[in-house]
Image (cartoon, grey):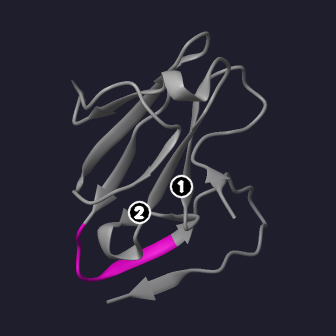
Amino acid sequence: GWCPLSPTGAQTTQLLVDPPWRPAVLWDRVTLICQGSGTAGATTWYKDGQHWGQKGPEYFTVTKTGTYMSDRPGTGRSPPVRVLNDWLVLQGPAWPLLEGDTVTLHCCS
């Protein structure tokens, strides 16, 4: 499933990650999905703070490390998502957690 990297319910652009773990790592074949108001085809993508590519689809599979953001008409820019290429990573759920929640962690190498 796709899970937000920031709390749901706010009227803002959200950048979702699949698979739903953070930190996101390149070898997980991460797909980023931009959610917000307006036409999906009007999504603008940013990589490392720079405009990246043309307006286009609401999702894509990441092939390079970096910090990604998306922008949708009406709701603005999403919070950033960093995609790493580290060899040893301790991953936790990408959704918000509360004290007392049971958490499954992945140790990946």
Which numbered marker is on residue 17? Answer: 1
Pointer 1: residues within 10 angstroms few (<14), some, or many (20+)?
many
Q: Considering depth in this image, is 49 or 97 the residue closer to the camera?
A: 49
SS class, disc 2: strand
Q: Which residues are magenta?
A: 85-91
**Residue occupied by mark 2:** 24
Quarter placement of the C terminus: bottom left
Amino acid type at image mark 1: Val
At 53% across and 38% down in the image, what residue appears?
58
| Quarter of the view holding residue 92 | bottom right
Q: Contact, CB < 8 Å: mark 2 with mark 1?
A: yes
Q: Is residue 68 above or below residue 56?
A: below
Determine whether, in the image, residue 7 is placed left or right of residue 100. Answer: left
Percent x, y for residue 1?
69, 64
Tag 1's secondary structure? Answer: strand
Image x and y of residue 56, in percent = 43, 31
* Alpha carbon distance from label 2 to label 1: 8 Å
Q: Which mark is residue 42?
A: none
Q: Is residue 77 visible?
A: no
